[in-house]
Amino acid sequence: MPAPELTSEAFGLFKELPMKHRLRLAALILVAGTVVSETRCDPEVHVKPTSDPTFSNLPAAVPLWRGAAPGSEGQDSPPARRWENYATTWYSVVTNINSPAILPFLPPAGKATGAAVIVCPGGGHRFLAMEHEGYAVGKWLSEHGVAAFVLEYRLARSDGSRYSVEVHSLMDAQRAVRTVRSRAGEWGVNPACVGIMGFSAGGEVAVLAATRSGTPVPGTRDSVDALDCAPNFQALFYPGMPAPPPVPSAKTPPAFLCGASDDHLGLTPGMVQFYLALTAAGVPAELHVYARGGHGFGIRDEDREVYSWMPLFMSWLRGGGFLSNPAAARP
């Protein structure tokens, strides 16, 4: 699309300006033309699939409780998979979580570092964006020697939900950390290197798990709940923040934080404020804010600068000493 044309009156005023002002105005006009051209392009349209989403080669889910989870008594309907529309793209989600579970993505033989991560997908507490914030993350971490456990946590804002974020979702995250520690020998995990990672709404769950381990949500009084639920590190991606914002202490685990300036949900300022609170409390923290990346980038098969977070995160784990002691994971 060509640059906008000036009327004769506007052109007369334009000629009266000093040369440096004319050059600056001309540049602005050209940029405006480019922006108009870009915004008028036809958007990419994806047609909603006619069948329900399915995934192959997923690990079997491990329930966090043998029977009904505390607070889910009488709620036994299974998880449901459906399609959700986001920015003209249809992607698969999981909802109706009544029996919280973890899906273990374990590293290949000989590659395990001993580190483990509980992965909390986002979805506004209405559903779980499992494809790009769950399964893809778990697969990538396991390929790099980190045992990943994708968490199916209860959703506080799904239709008809009687759950809450600060009770049931947090309870599920705390139980997931304990469950991984309880089976560390079986899964090749170092119990002292169990972290939590959260995306968007899952970031809120992860923040709560990282800052409220001193006062765990009461669950069951079994041997698993007797274990420590405090994660050894936290990784937060464009996270939602609890209200009021958590107050870190010297016991808060080290943090890796990542987001984008153009997050249209406006979550980046809250993440930056949490980073500042962490550093003020003396907690080691690393912050990455990309100029472009939007909200919900997770891990997708795209060539974008924002995905440099992946090697940066592995370097951060290595620098924190979380990848250096796999022998401690063995019985």
Image (cartoon, rainbow, N blue to C red):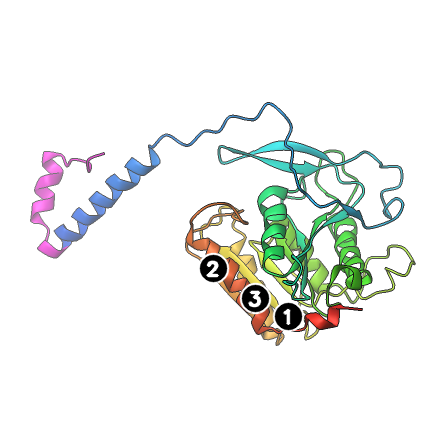
CA distance separating discs 3 and 2? 11 Å
Can residue 276 be seen here? The reply is: no
Q: Residue furthest top?
A: 50
- Check the image and report above or below for 50 versus 190: above
Q: Quadrant of residue 35?
A: top left
Disc 1 is placed on an element classified as loop
Image point (73%, 68%), residue name: 190
CA distance separating discs 1 and 2? 23 Å
Image point (51%, 50%), residue name: 266
Q: Does residue 287 appear to the left or right of 198 in the view shown?
A: left
Q: Does residue 75 appear to the left or right of 110 in the view shown?
A: right
Q: Earlier in the sequence, mark 1 or mark 2?
A: 2
Q: Earlier in the sequence, mark 3 or mark 2?
A: 3
* Residue highlighted by disc 3: 275
User: Which image quarter is the N terminus in?
Assistant: top left
Q: Is residue 4 inside the magenta stretch?
A: yes
How many other residues sit within 10 Å of disc 2, few (<14), some (14-19) or many (≥20)?
A: some
Disc 2 is placed on an element classified as strand
Image point (60%, 66%), residue name: 255
* Magenta extent: 1-20
* Residue highlighted by disc 2: 289
Image point (60%, 42%), residue name: 131
Residue 124 tag number: none
